[in-house]
Image (cartoon, grey):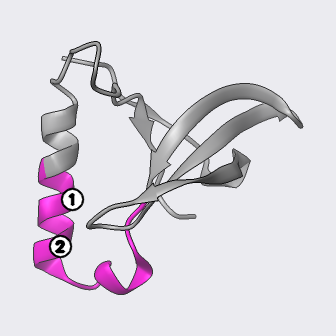
């Protein structure tokens, strides 16, 4: 199983949009915990605000997250962590 970190959403800086999926946007972000414009680059998948109030959507999103924790293949982006809205 992959160790899943928790990231501070205030320190994620959007670089550009990568795409859009069923749940929401996928964006290229830089995590800047200490210094501006210095940090690791991540693809960040987010859930649309209007979907947050739908229990079935939240359950589906959580199931996808749980599945991604166990995927390990060179052609699949690895799940690094999660950030919750502040």
- Reply above or below: 55 against 61: below
Q: Disc 1, disc 2: CB below 8 Å?
A: yes
**Residue in the picture at 16% in, 40% down:** 66
Q: Secondary structure at mark 1?
A: helix
Residue 12 locus on image (x, y percent): 67, 47
Classify residue 25 by image quadrant.
bottom left
Residue toward you, 80 or 78:
78
* Residue 29 in the figure: left or right of residue 45: right
* Residue 27 in the figure: left or right of residue 23: right
* Residue 32 in the figure: left or right of residue 12: right
Name the residue that disc number 1 marks: 61
* Mark 1 neighbour density, 10 Å: few (under 14) some (14–19) many (20 or more): some
- Reply above or below: 9 against 29: below
**Residue in the picture at 57% in, 64% down:** 86
Residue 62 locus on image (x, y percent): 19, 54
Which stretch did the figure color magenta?
46-63
Residue 63 locus on image (x, y percent): 12, 51
As drawn, the label of residue 14 is none
Q: Quadrant of the N terminus?
A: top left
Name the residue that disc number 2 marks: 57
């Amino acid at each position: 199983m992959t160790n899943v970190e928790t990231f501070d959403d205030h320190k994620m800086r959007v670089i550009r949009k990568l795409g859009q999926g069923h749940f929401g946007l996928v964006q290229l972000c830089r995590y800047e915990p200490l210094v501006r414009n210095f940090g690791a680059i991540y693809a960040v998948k987010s859930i649309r605000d209007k979907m947050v109030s739908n229990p079935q959507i939240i359950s589906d999103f959580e199931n996808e997250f749980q599945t991604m924790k166990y995927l390990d293949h060179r052609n699949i982006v690895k799940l690094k962590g999660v950030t919750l809205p502040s």
